[in-house]
Amino acid sequence: MTDDMQTENAGQRTTPPKVSCLGPEGSYSELAAKKMCEGAEIVLCHSFVDAVRRLVGGKVDYAVLPVENSLNGGIQECLDLLEEYDIFASREFPLPVDHRLATLEGVSFDRIERVYSHEQALGQCLGFLTENFPNAQYIHTNSTAESLEKLSATSAGIVGAHLAREGIVLSDENIADNKANFTRFLLVERKGALPESSVMVFFSAVCADKPGSLLGLLKIFLRHGLNLTRIESRPVKKEFGQYRFFIEFAGDLSAEWVQKALAEARAYCVQFKILGAYH
């Protein structure tokens, strides 16, 4: 549980905080939420946007969202949600991902015609799938845990190793193409005052549509000696040909040079939003 949650529990709060995340029970998002928010009431949602809308609507106190996988990169839907809604990331947590093939007892590989899982999991296990099930259909589900509902005599799923259940057989080994597989989750809250200090700062920006505009933005952080740890782009919705950059850098919000860099970046960009600051 975070320090803020503990303070709330020790003060006015008499019930555990509520934390929304993608379900169903057994999803990686639920596992991350339990590890990040020990003792909290976990509210399982049918989609990432549902988890965020519950937060914005005041039905929960926090939401947990995956934003990046070490194999597949940024999780685009969640990046868009951070930009679209008035929310703020206050903590990050890297969760080790251990993908296992799940089948019903007695099902052999040569009978499998369909493999179900979240598209991120399918992508992370594509080498294993094409080698063992080259003719199977790979079908997306809302979460890895949901694929358990699709198991049959001719289908399999990809789930976390923590989902061992009676009647279901999990592969002995991790089937991901790269076993050093992590998904980074963010603890998100309704936007309020920025924290006084941080180790990392995460923001989004839209630059002017002219040559060298992105370079100009990056030079601001170079001048202030700040190390950019991540940058990726997403199309700006309803503005074809325009792109939004999601950028993270190592920096303490209490430092004067960090505040100056952010102020310069805000003035330089067409659109600018701080998405998170965390330890």
Image (tube, grey):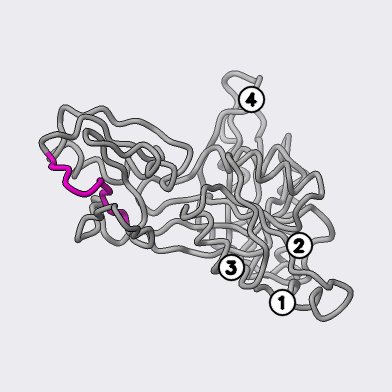
Instruction: Please name which of the two marks, 2 or 1, marks the residue nearer to the observer.
Output: 1
Q: Do the numbered discs 1 and 3 sit on residues whose CB atoms are within 8 Å? A: no
Quadrant of the rendered image containing residue 115: top left
Q: Residue at x 46, y 55 (%)?
A: 26
Mark 2 residue type: Gln
**Which amino acid type corresponds to the residue marked 3 in the rendered image?**
Met
Q: Earlier in the sequence, mark 1 or mark 3?
A: 1
Q: Which residues are magenta?
A: 99-109
Question: Which residue shows up at 75% across the image and 54% down it?
Answer: 60
Q: CA distance from mark 2 to mark 1?
A: 24 Å
Spot occupied by residue 265 in the image (x, y as percentages of width and height): 71, 48
Mark number for residue 259? 2
Name the secondary structure under disc 2: helix
Residue at horizontal 84 percent and vertical 71 percent from the top: 13
Residue at which label 1 appears: 3
User: Which mark, residue 237?
Assistant: 4
The residue tagged 3 is 36
